[in-house]
Image (cartoon, grey):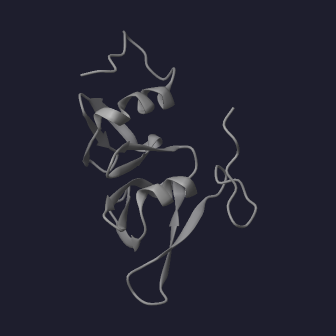
Amino acid sequence: MERERINAFGNSLDTQNFVFVKTENKGKFVKILIKDICYIEGLGNYITIHTCEGGKTITYGTLTEIVDFLPSTFIRIHKSYVVSVDSIQIIEGNQLKMSNKKDIPLGTGYRENLFQALGSKFIGGKVHKES
């Protein structure tokens, strides 16, 4: 059984609906609704949060750090990407088409985790986990 993840305020991360993200501007934080996040891209020690409407916010941090902070509807699918499962529109081979029309690579080592997370959400034939 997966343990419930709790944030610094004592709230379940799975029910939290927003985060404040420190931007590259000193002292500036931007509120981002969790439901608006399409995917997060890692760029070394920085991450870019991409929204489904096409916006993006860059902040200092790593994907490993942010995965621990996000609700369980987010999954790491590549060494450089974490996606919102709700924003995946198409899975084709080793590519995901997101709701903001961007193509995201699906890393071979992360493929099995994605299919496990999606579980019984497939209809119409056998799912091929290796491509």
Q: Nearer the viewer, residue 42 or 56?
A: 42
Q: Position of residue 42 (x, y in %)?
A: 33, 59
Q: Position of residue 54 (x, y in %)?
A: 32, 61
In the picture, the quarter occupied by the C terminus is top left
Q: Is residue 56 left or right of residue 113?
A: left
* Location of residue 113 with respect to 11 vertically, above or below: above
Q: Residue furthest right?
A: 10
* Location of residue 71 with respect to 116 vertically, above or below: below
Q: Position of residue 115 (x, y in %)?
A: 43, 27
The picture quadrant where one finds residue 88 is top left
Q: Position of residue 11 (x, y in %)?
A: 73, 59
* Location of residue 32 with respect to 40 vertically, above or below: below
The residue lying at 67 percent from left, 52 percent from top is 15
The residue lying at 42 percent from left, 79 percent from top is 23
The residue lying at 31 percent from left, 52 percent from top is 80
Q: Nearer the viewer, residue 106 or 37?
A: 106
Q: Residue furthest bottom?
A: 26
